[in-house]
Image (cartoon, rainbow, N blue to C red):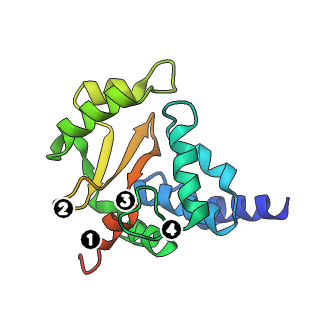
Amino acid sequence: MKKVLLALLLTGFLFGNDNSIGGLFKEIKAKVVTKQYGAIKENIYGLNGDFNYEWIVGGIKSRNALASDDNGFSLEALESLIQHSKRFEPLHKSPLYGTVKKGFLKSFKDNDPKAPFSKDLKNGAQHIYILAAPKTKSMILVFNDDGHYKLVWWKEMVRVANTLKGAK
């Protein structure tokens, strides 16, 4: 119970209602630090039941920091994402848009009955943001779901974060 309260305090008081991509990653970091893995679910946009939630949290729990591990994780990489969160760009401006659209629509079922993520992906991806590692298919996707940012996917998040080192 004390850990739950600490996580709520960290996310609420320290970070306020930082409704930004950086704020999303700050909330996730606070929950990771306090080992409130179940609470991370509210920061993830659900696909295929709990698939992407279990996949992301599984990587966080195992702490495999290999850059090439699909669901690898490190706090250092997460901190880099927070520091460089303004580098996310609308997916429709990314050269990976077509690949992401095709792959996600073919492989994943949107959990929401109204399917806002899938609809947005089909209709120009105006609310989906990507941070990609150049010359790879490594990426992090975030969806602005009705005013609240949600993590959709991080593929090789450590690799993506490593590309930010030295970036201004």
Circle number at residue 64 = 4
**Residue 114 spot, x, y in % from top left:** 46, 18
Q: Is 98 left, or right, of 65 in this rendering?
A: left
Q: Which quarter shows the C terminus?
A: bottom left
* Mark before the other along the chain sequence, 3 or 1: 3
Which residue is most to the right?
Answer: 1
Secondary element type, mark 2: loop
Element at label 3:
loop
Task: Check disc 4 and give the amino acid type.
Answer: Asn
Reading the image, the residue beneath label 1 is 163
Give 161 or 108, whichever is nearer the viewer: 108
Name the amino acid, label 3: Glu
| Above or below, 13 relative to 50 | below
Q: Which of disc 2 and disc 3 is earlier in sequence?
A: 2
Q: Which numbered disc covers residue 156?
A: 3
Comparing labels 4 and 1, the label whose residue is closer to the camera: 4
Real-space Cα distance between discs 3 and 4? 11 Å
Question: Residue 167's spot in the image, x, y percent?
Answer: 24, 76
Q: How packed is label 3: few (under 14 Cα within 10 Å), some, or many (20 or more)?
A: many
Quick check: marks 4 and 1 in contact, CB under 8 Å?
Answer: no
Q: Tell me, yes or no, if residue 127 can be seen here.
A: yes
Q: Residue at x 35, y 64 (%)?
A: 68
Q: Residue at x 37, y 59 (%)?
A: 156
- Under circle 1, the secondary element is helix
Name the residue located 43 percent from the left edge and 60 percent from the top edge.
22
Residue 134: mark in rendering: 2
Mark before the other along the chain sequence, 4 or 2: 4
How many badges with numbers are in the image?
4
The mark that comes first in sequence, 3 or 4, is 4
Task: Give the distance between the C-alpha atoms of the residues marked 4 and 1, in whole angstroms.
Answer: 18 Å
Decide which of 86, 141 is in the foreground and name it: 141
